[in-house]
Amino acid sequence: MSDVTRKPALILDVTLVTSVTPQITNSDLEEIHTWLFSIGEPEEDHHLVIDKYWNDPQALEYFLKHARGEFKHSYTVTDERR
């Protein structure tokens, strides 16, 4: 007889997450577009911001905070064409 005691194996059920897609609502998108217009960002460049936050949930949070006025800022937007 053997002195080895057998124990049941530990089996883990693991699910890999390869990417996280931010949950973006139409309201979020509207807020960001409105903010971009308010800071003088040309509409044809809005896609640059949108593309950025599609790939980066932290960027979405950052842009939404700006759009909602949650950041204090001390800059002004000027139009150099004047």
Image (cartoon, rainbow, N blue to C red):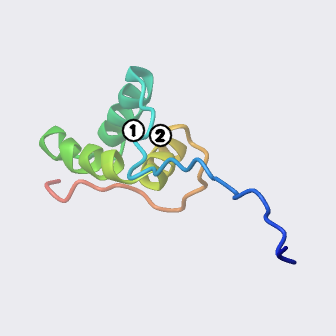
Mark 2 element type:
helix
Q: Quadrant of the N terminus?
A: bottom right
At 43% across and 54% down in the image, what residue appears?
Answer: 59
Quarter of the image for residue 36 reads top left
Q: Position of residue 76 (x, y in %)?
A: 42, 57
* Left or right, residue 10 beside residue 82: right
Q: Position of residue 39 (x, y in %)?
A: 35, 46
Quarter of the image for residue 7 reads bottom right
Quarter of the image for residue 37 reads top left
Q: Which residue is mark 1?
A: 35
Q: CA distance from mark 1 to mark 2?
A: 5 Å
* Left or right, residue 47 beside residue 61: left
* Left or right, residue 36 beside residue 67: left
At 39% across and 38% down in the image, what residue appears?
Answer: 35
The 10 Å Cα crowd at callout 2, few under 14, some 14 to 19, many 20 or more, is: many
- Residue type (three-letter) at the residue carrying disc 2: Ala
- Residue type (three-letter) at the residue carrying disc 1: Trp
- Determine which of the numbered discs, if any, sits on residue 60 in the image: none
* Left or right, residue 63 beside residue 7: left
Query: Do labels 1 and 2 touch, CB within 8 Å?
Result: yes
Is 31 placed above or below 78 here?
above
Q: Which residue is mark 2?
A: 67
Of 20 and 45, which appears nearest the observer?
20
Is 23 placed above or below 62 here?
above
Q: Position of residue 28 (x, y in %)?
A: 43, 29
Of 32 and 13, which appears nearest the observer?
13
Of 46 and 17, which appears nearest the observer?
17
Q: Position of residue 66 (x, y in %)?
A: 50, 47
Q: Residue furthest front?
A: 1
Q: Residue furthest bottom?
A: 3
